[in-house]
Image (cartoon, rainbow, N blue to C red):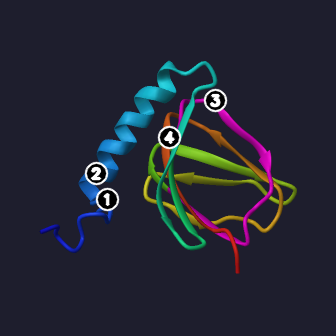
């Protein structure tokens, strides 16, 4: 008899998130563009992704989802946009602007992007 939750994926634990972060920083360091990302949680309109960026690498300007935040697990980044730039360091979390914006790593950085894709 199958376990009732056999087909359900387990939610990642904090330890898994740390391993995922380290894995993607290694991938970013070997990638020509200096970045690596992975969508690790999807639940209806909720999305959470880990993004690793090497120092100086960028995510080009892009549209913002209806709601999103960026949490820095390691390093520091700058959110760029049409309004004032915001710098975030390890442990910081920030609501993303409701405008086109980009992201630049001021040093090797690992961030968690939480986004709601529909309201």
Residue 114 x %, y %: 55, 64
Instruction: Give the mark nearer the N terminus: 4 vs 1.
Output: 1
Quadrant assignment for the C terminus:
bottom right
The residue beneath circle 3 is: 56
Give the foreground label among 4 and 1. 1
**Is there a contact, CB below 8 Å, between mark 1 and mark 2?**
yes
Real-space Cα separation, disc 1 to disc 3, in angstroms: 29 Å
Residue with the mark numbered 4? 109
What's the CA distance linking mark 4 and mark 1?
Answer: 20 Å
Query: What is the x, y in percent for residue 117?
Result: 67, 68
Give the extent of the magenta segment: 52-71
**Direction from residue 100 to residue 34 in the image, left or right:** left
Secondary structure of the residue carrying numbered label 1: loop
Most extreme residue toward the right is 82
- The answer to whether 13 appears left or right of 116 in the picture is left
Give the residue drawn at x 79%, y 50%. 62
**Residue 70, magenta (yes or no):** yes
Query: Element type at marker 3?
Result: loop
* Number of the label disc, if any, that sits on residue 12: 1
Return the residue at label 2: 16
The reply, left or right, for residue 65 in relation to residue 9 is right
Counting residues from the start of the chain, the first of labels 4 and 3 encountered is: 3
**Real-space Cα distance between discs 1 and 2?**
6 Å
Mark 2 or mark 3: which is in front? 2
């Amino acid at each position: 008899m199958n376990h009732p939750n056999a087909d359900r994926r387990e939610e990642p634990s904090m330890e898994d998130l740390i391993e995922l972060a380290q894995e993607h920083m290694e991938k970013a360091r070997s990638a020509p563009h200096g970045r690596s990302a992975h969508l690790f949680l999807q639940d209806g309109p909720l999305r959470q992704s880990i993004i690793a960026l090497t120092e100086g690498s960028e995510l080009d300007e892009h549209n913002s989802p209806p709601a999103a935040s960026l949490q820095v697990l390691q390093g520091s980044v700058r959110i760029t946009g049409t309004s004032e730039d915001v710098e975030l360091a390890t442990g910081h979390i920030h609501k993303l602007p409701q405008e086109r914006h980009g992201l630049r790593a001021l040093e090797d950085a690992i961030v968690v992007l939480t986004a709601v894709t529909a309201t």
